[in-house]
Amino acid sequence: MKLLFKQRLFSWFDSYDIYDEFGNTVYVVKGQLSWGHKLVIYDADGNEIVKAYIPVFDATENVPASCSATEIYKNGTYIGCLSKEISFLTPHYNIDYNGWHIDGSIMEWDYNILDQRGYSVASVSKELFHMTDTYVIQVNEPEYALDALMFVLAIDAEKCSRK
């Protein structure tokens, strides 16, 4: 399954449209004001389904103390945390979800989401020469499409918090 992740032009907050390979909008992502960086994924009907949140300070309940980075919530329930590893040249992320981890390229444009055995769950690549950020997410198993998207958004939130 292939998803196209395209940032909206002229938005005050992070705002993205997510299209399937046929050009249909399947998700809408909106940044929100909060005490930290928050991105929310809505389905095509406008229902909130996922949040990626980097808190300024940890005031949330039921989140492990080990989560010092991006918290992920699916259907209102905490499901995991994405944290960046210290690495040389290329970015690496740990996810306390399904044993997955993410390896990136030196320019931080391309990523591979890998399972605990090292097999590819999804690959993410940035398309160049667009007015806004545009990424293609290639998911090997369609049931992991939303999971892959939420971790791509978590990386985006983490990168934005560094600026």
Image (tube, rainbow, N blue to C red):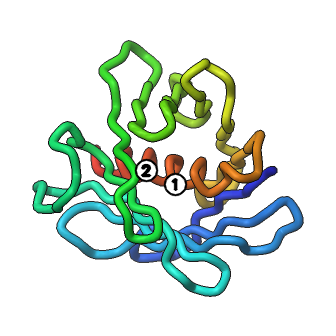
Furthest-top residue in this view: 88
Query: Residue 81, how many percent across, how many down?
Result: 34, 44
Task: Name the residue: 41% across, 65% down.
Answer: 51
Residue sitting farthest toward the bottom: 45
The residue pinned by badge 2 equals 154
Is 40 placed left or right of 17 in the picture?
left
Give me the residue at 51% from left, 32% from top: 100
Is residue 42 toward the left or the right of residue 75 in the image? Answer: right
Q: Are marks 1 and 2 in contact (CB under 8 Å)?
A: yes
In the image, residue 158 above or below residue 33: above
Q: Residues within 10 Å of mark 1 (few under 14, many from 20)?
A: many
SS assignment at label 2: helix
Side of 2 where 131 appears, left or right? left
**Residue 92, image x and y in percent?**
44, 25
Of 127 and 91, nearer the camera is: 91
Which residue type carries mark 2? Ala
Q: CA distance from mark 1 to mark 2?
A: 6 Å
Instruction: Tell me the tag on residue 150.
Output: 1
Instruction: Answer with left or right where residue 147 lies relative to residue 34.
Output: right
- Asked which secondary structure carries label 1, the reply is helix
Kindly indicate the quadrant of the structure image that contains residue 17. Answer: bottom right
Which of these two is toward me, 138 or 10? 138
